[in-house]
Image: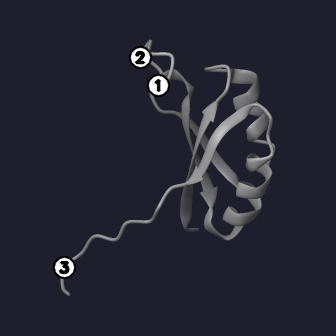
Amino acid sequence: MSTRYINVDFKKGPDESLRQKLYQISGIIEVVHLFPDIYDAELARMYLIHVEDSKLDEVFAVLSIFPELDNVEITVRRYHGGGI
């Protein structure tokens, strides 16, 4: 299974109940708090959501209308490797 990523900001900062609610969405594999030990208000809101590649568009559409989330954006794929 290939994994893609969506960046989101929780409007009200860290919220375990919202995090658990997101796991109910089909296609979401993991919800990771990016800076759990930093006490900066902006950084504390940032999460990375791991999504099944085949469900990316569907999950993105659902997250985009979640009232508790800001700045929902798909992470750009970056390819690293040799050759031209």
* Figure quadrant of residue 14: top right
Residue in the foreground of this view, choosing between 24 and 79: 79
Which label belongs to residue 38? 2
Q: Nearer the viewer, mark 1 or mark 3?
A: 1
Who's the residue at 44% across and 15% down the image? 40
Residue named by callout 1: 43
Choose top left, top right, bottom left or bottom right for residue 51: bottom right
Q: Which residue is mark 3?
A: 82
**Quadrant of the snapshot with the C terminus:** bottom left
Secondary element under disc 2, as helix, strand or loop, is loop
**Which of the two discs, 1 and 3, labels the residue nearer the N terminus?**
1
- Which amino acid type is shown beneath numbered disc 3? Gly
Q: Residue at x 51, y 16 (%)?
A: 41
Mark 2 neighbour density, 10 Å: few (under 14) some (14–19) many (20 or more): few
Res 35 label: none
Q: Is residue 26 visible?
A: no
Q: How much space separates mark 1 and mark 2, taking CA atoms?
A: 7 Å
Q: Residue 53's spot in the image, x, y percent? A: 62, 67
Amino acid type, mark 2: Ile
- Say which element carries label 1: helix
Residue at image coords 75%, 39%: 22
- Circles 1, 2 touching at the beta carbon (< 8 Å): yes
Q: Earlier in the sequence, mark 1 or mark 2?
A: 2
Q: Which amino acid lies under the numbered mark 1 shown in the image of this protein?
A: Leu
